[in-house]
Image (cartoon, helix red, strand yellow):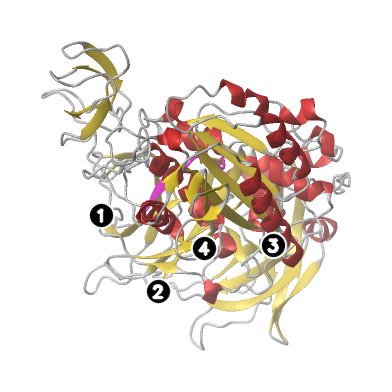
């Protein structure tokens, strides 16, 4: 499984002032908490940003690192708090985000309205390799222009800013903010230590900006000018000066007293030779079994920097070879990901009117295997589909006495959203369909490949995923092999999910099909649903784990590189409404050592069951602890009984006990088969 490091940055606008009457303006900081979304996961506080004094539109410089994989959802709660000295801090609003949802949004930015007022923006970018060292920098201002009026002097401070690649990356984002010097137009600012990768992704010739401001208590700092430069220019300009410009006017100069890169590694990711197409698998990041998001150590002023000699010649920096883009590069770089779904309607699925058959729709709201696979896998892929329009096909059924191996499901060529797919699937049984056979994949695969190529001709960065659901092995293995080999050149990945208890051993030919068939691409992944029936996360991980490498290999071997979304602007960011159930203020304990811990788990568990709502997030109660004991964080167990159906296995008679897994928690349960329920029959369990 491909795992990449992502970086989360935050800002807010229009926050409500909660400081109180006559107490000035709020001093907001943000706390990021990783929420629990699966059995055994524990919520925990990842860290907090710096405090922005007297500001209702803070732009924090602190960022947070996450391990990202395509098939795993990661939910975070961002709580904005007003720092109040000698009193309890006051909440200003909270919002829940999903990391993949942010990444898949235009500009890799997601925005949400807050209950108390204001909007919170969360941006995801690819975390740079952590090997380019620190920029040790000492600056001073010379004859700065006073912008503080006739009777006082400015209190200048400086910011170091950067831009980000990809959509929405054109604006300057602060990476470092120094302390202000009071009443001084010739300030000697404290030394700064800035992570070079954070500043410029290790590219020493990338444009950055130094901006100077007059500090104001109300947070509305006045610009005193800025200049653009690069890290290389700063290092070479020790003893030199830069003019501060505000429009066409000069507002003074900034002298570079000392500047040097410290701790740069000679063996970095940027210095590796370019990846060869055939080596994509060998050079992929290692599989990470534990999930450990981190808070990034952000640049802050260093107290003992004054005694260090930062002068000297700049370090020689090797010129890095071109880097092979990653999955995140493409997703952030204008890649259009599309999904289509194909559903098996052969007679071996059983009569859908009978409980326990594979296409039966429960009147009690429990999903069948097809619905679960569509909602689980589809909801992740859909995050990266810009128009949310999905073709849905069926195969293996008769219409007008003729077996159709590829027919439209639903009233239109495409349906909207995952709910639209599920509605179209259910609606097909209201048509004159007769479930038949045999099981033939070839026509839906050929159609998906043709449509993928057509989209690719319009947009070279278009890529498609076919989610194919079946209850049995293909009838003609050789014909299927030939079709798979013939479409291996299409911008397409195929995920086949086996539903039910059939013998899928004949599908083993899909394993290692690329090597044994001689084609140059592996485009197929087969997963048996029953192995993940009670664990949604494990299903999505296994079904989607190969897609990132398949996508990257297709584009890179054809010389197709990520592109910036030149039509994107901040005005095009979609702002989601406040979610009353999920976007709640978490209760926190603040230690004397500065540590922050959760005070209770209310709001920290996201419902990640198959039956969870498709439109909005839902929180579930935290696990309960025995009376008088310390709280225990364990698997997410609802406090209310959950009702589900169990099908009696073959050769098991009524009165016998069987072991089943709880659909929400995966915990084993021992239940007795009620009297009168035969093998293959269905009975209800409440646990």
Q: Is residue 558 left or right of residue 632?
A: right
Q: Earlier in the sequence, mark 1 or mark 3?
A: 3
Q: Position of residue 39 (x, y in %)?
A: 35, 30
| Residue 335 higher or lower than 23, as above or below | above
Q: Secondary structure at mark 2?
A: loop
Residue 77 visible: yes
In the rendered structure, find residue 218 and report the number of the disc placed on it. Answer: 2
Tell me how far mark 2 sits from mark 1, CA to CA: 34 Å
In the rendered structure, find residue 455 and report the number of the disc placed on it. Answer: 3
Q: Position of residue 62 (x, y in %)?
A: 52, 52
Q: Nearer the viewer, residue 643 or 639?
A: 643
Q: Earlier in the sequence, mark 3 or mark 2?
A: 2
Tell me how far mark 3 sits from mark 2, CA to CA: 52 Å
Q: Tell me the residue at 39%/70% (across/down).
A: 56
In the rendered structure, find residue 581 and report the number of the disc placed on it. Answer: 1
Q: Which quadrant is home to the C terminus?
A: top left
Q: Earlier in the sequence, mark 2 or mark 1?
A: 2
Q: Nearer the viewer, residue 140 or 516?
A: 516
Tell me how far mark 4 sits from mark 2, CA to CA: 52 Å
Q: Tell me the residue at 36%/27% (across/down).
A: 40
Q: Secondary structure at mark 4?
A: loop
Q: Which residues are magenta?
A: 69-78
Q: Which dot, 4 or 2, sits closer to the camera?
A: 4
Q: Earlier in the sequence, mark 4 or mark 3?
A: 4
């Amino acid at each position: 499984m491909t795992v990449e490091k992502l970086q989360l940055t935050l800002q807010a606008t229009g926050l409500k002032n909660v400081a109180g009457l006559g107490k000035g303006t709020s001093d907001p900081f943000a706390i990021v908490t990783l929420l629990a979304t699966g059995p055994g996961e524990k919520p925990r506080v990842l860290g907090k940003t710096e405090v922005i004094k007297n500001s209702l539109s803070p732009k924090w410089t602190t960022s947070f690192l996450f391990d990202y994989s395509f098939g795993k959802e990661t939910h975070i709660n961002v709580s904005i708090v007003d720092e109040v000295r000698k009193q309890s801090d006051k909440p200003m609003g909270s919002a829940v985000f999903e990391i993949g949802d942010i990444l898949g949004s235009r500009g890799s930015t997601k925005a949400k309205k807050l209950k108390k007022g204001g909007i919170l923006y969360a941006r995801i970018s690819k975390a740079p390799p952590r090997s380019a060292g620190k920029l040790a920098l000492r600056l001073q201002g010379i004859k700065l222009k006073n912008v503080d009026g006739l009777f006082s002097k400015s209190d200048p401070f400086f910011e170091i800013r950067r831009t980000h690649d990809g959509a929405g990356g054109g604006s300057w984002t602060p990476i470092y903010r120094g302390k202000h010097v009071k009443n001084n137009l010739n300030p000697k600012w404290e030394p700064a230590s800035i992570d070079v990768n954070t500043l410029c992704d290790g590219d020493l010739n990338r444009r950055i900006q130094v901006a100077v401001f007059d500090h104001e208590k109300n947070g509305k700092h006045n610009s005193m000018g800025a200049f653009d430069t690069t890290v290389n220019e700063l290092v070479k300009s020790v003893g030199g000066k830069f003019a501060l410009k505000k429009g066409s006017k000069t507002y003074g100069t900034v002298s570079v007293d000392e500047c040097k890169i410290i701790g740069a590694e000679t063996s970095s990711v940027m210095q590796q030779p370019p990846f060869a197409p055939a080596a994509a698998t060998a050079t992929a990041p290692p599989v990470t079994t534990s999930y450990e998001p981190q808070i990034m150590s952000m640049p802050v002023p260093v107290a003992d920097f004054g005694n260090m000699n930062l002068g000297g010649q700049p370090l020689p920096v090797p010129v890095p070879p071109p880097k092979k883009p990653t999955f995140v590069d493409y997703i952030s770089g204008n890649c259009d990901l599309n999904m289509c779904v194909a559903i098996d309607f052969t007679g071996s699925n059983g009569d859908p009117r009978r409980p326990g058959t594979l296409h039966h729709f429960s009147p009690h709201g429990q999903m069948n295997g097809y619905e679960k696979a569509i909602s689980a896998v589809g909801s992740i892929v859909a995050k990266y589909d810009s128009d949310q329009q999905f073709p849905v096909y069926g195969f293996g059924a008769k219409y007008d006495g003729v077996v159709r191996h590829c027919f439209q499901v639903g009233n239109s060529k495409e349906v909207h959203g995952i709910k639209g797919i599920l509605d179209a699937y259910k609606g097909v049984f209201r048509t004159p369909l007769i479930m038949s056979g045999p099981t033939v994949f070839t026509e839906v695969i050929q159609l998906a490949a043709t449509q993928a190529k057509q989209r690719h001709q319009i947009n070279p960065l278009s890529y498609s995923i076919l989610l194919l659901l079946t209850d049995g092995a293909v009838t003609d293995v050789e014909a299927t092999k030939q079709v798979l080999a013939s479409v291996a050149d299409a911008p397409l990945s195929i995920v086949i999910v086996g539903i039910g208890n059939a013998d899928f051993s004949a599908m083993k030919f899909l394993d290692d099909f690329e090597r044994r068939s001689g084609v140059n691409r592996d485009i197929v992944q087969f997963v048996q649903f029953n192995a993940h029936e009670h664990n949604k996360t494990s299903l999505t991980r296994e079904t989607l784990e190969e897609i990132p490498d398949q996508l990257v290999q297709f584009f890179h071997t054809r010389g197709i590189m990520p592109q910036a979304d030149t039509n994107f602007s901040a005005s095009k960011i979609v702002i989601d409404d406040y979610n009353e159930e999920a976007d709640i203020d978490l209760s926190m304990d603040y230690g004397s050592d500065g540590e922050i811990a959760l005070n209770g788990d209310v709001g920290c568990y996201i419902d990640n069951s198959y039956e969870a709502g498709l439109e909005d997030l839902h929180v579930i109660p935290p696990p309960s602890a025995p009376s008088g004991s310390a709280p225990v964080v364990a698997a997410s167990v609802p406090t209310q009984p959950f009702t589900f159906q169990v099908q009696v296995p073959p050769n098991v008679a009524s009165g016998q006990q069987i072991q089943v897994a709880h659909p929400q928690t995966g915990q084993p349960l021992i239940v007795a088969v009620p009297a009168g329920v035969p093998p293959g029959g269905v009975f209800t369990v409440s646990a």
